[in-house]
Image (tube, rainbow, N blue to C red):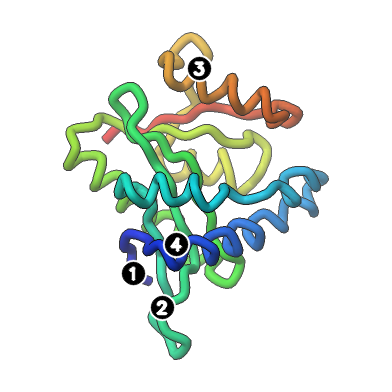
């Protein structure tokens, strides 16, 4: 796997990665998450233009295929991970961990102090996974204004139907 910035031509493939990565939520009784549409092309392009849309690519016989991607943006002095999606064909190979490490390196270069994210608490490849990587849950009282705004937007989209948590990893 190699991590690099996404190209404009790859953005539709990132939507395919998102759809495939979402499918396992169906088995957890979360079909609304499984069927949720991936970020629109203009949203992906905004992250790409900002230099915050990274892909993990396979370097095999088929050429460079996006196997995973990560979207991030600065929020209140930290780099907020908006999305990490790994195609099932690349699952359990450490691809998500490598993408997060890449994001952490970029955040350090920019003088940011932490990575933050929001995630489902009871999904094995969400909060428990991030905890193993050094993220800690943030109590509601420790949420920054930007994280509060993100959580409010998530709630407005119905994501609070399932327990969610904000997490932070210091850099």
The residue tagged with tag 1: helix, strand or loop?
A: strand
Ranked by sequence position, the earlier of labels 2 and 3 is 2
Q: Nearer the viewer, mark 4 or mark 3?
A: 3
The residue tagged with tag 2: helix, strand or loop?
A: strand
Q: Which residue is mark 4?
A: 94
The residue tagged with tag 3: helix, strand or loop?
A: helix
- Residue at x 46% of width, y 66% of height: 10
Distance (Cα) linking label 4 and label 1 = 12 Å
Q: Nearer the viewer, mark 2 or mark 1?
A: 2
**Above or below, 2 relative to 60:** above
Asked if marks 2 and 1 touch (Cβ < 8 Å), the reply is yes
Ranked by sequence position, the earlier of labels 2 and 1 is 1
Q: Which residue is mark 2?
A: 64
Q: Nearer the viewer, mark 4 or mark 1?
A: 1
Q: For mark 2, does the 10 Å Cα neighbourhood hold few (<14), some (14 to 19), or many (20 or more) residues?
A: few
Q: For mark 3, does the 10 Å Cα neighbourhood hold few (<14), some (14 to 19), or many (20 or more) residues?
A: some
Distance (Cα) linking label 4 and label 2 = 18 Å
**Above or below, 64 relative to 51:** below
Q: Nearer the viewer, mark 4 or mark 2?
A: 2
Q: In the image, which disc is placed on residue 73? A: none
Give the x, y percent position of residue 153.
59, 24
Ranked by sequence position, the earlier of labels 4 and 2 is 2
**Above or below, 71 relative to 19:** above
Asked if marks 4 and 1 touch (Cβ < 8 Å), the reply is no
Judging depth in this view, the residue of 96 and 21 nearest the camera is: 21
Give the x, y percent position of residue 23.
72, 58
Query: In which quadrant will I find the C terminus?
Result: top left
Distance (Cα) linking label 4 and label 3 = 30 Å
Q: Which residue is mark 1?
A: 2
Q: Which residue is mark 3?
A: 148
């Amino acid at each position: 796997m190699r991590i690099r910035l996404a190209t404009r031509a790859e953005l539709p493939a990132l939507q395919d990665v998102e759809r495939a990565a979402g499918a396992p939520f169906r088995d957890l009784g979360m079909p609304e998450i499984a069927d949720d549409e991936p970020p629109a092309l203009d949203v992906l392009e905004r992250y790409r233009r900002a230099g915050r849309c990274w892909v993990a690519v396979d370097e095999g016989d088929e050429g460079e295929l996006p196997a995973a991607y990560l979207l991030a943006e600065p929020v209140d002095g930290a780099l907020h991970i908006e999305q990490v999606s790994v195609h099932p064909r690349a699952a359990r190979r450490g691809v998500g961990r490598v993408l997060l490490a890449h994001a952490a390196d970029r955040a350090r270069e920019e003088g940011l102090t932490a990575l933050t994210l929001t995630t489902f608490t009871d999904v094995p490849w969400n909060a428990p996974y991030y905890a193993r990587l050094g993220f800690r849950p943030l109590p509601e009282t420790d949420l920054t204004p930007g994280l509060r705004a993100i959580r409010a937007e998530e709630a407005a989209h119905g994501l609070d139907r399932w327990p969610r948590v904000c997490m932070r990893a210091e850099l």
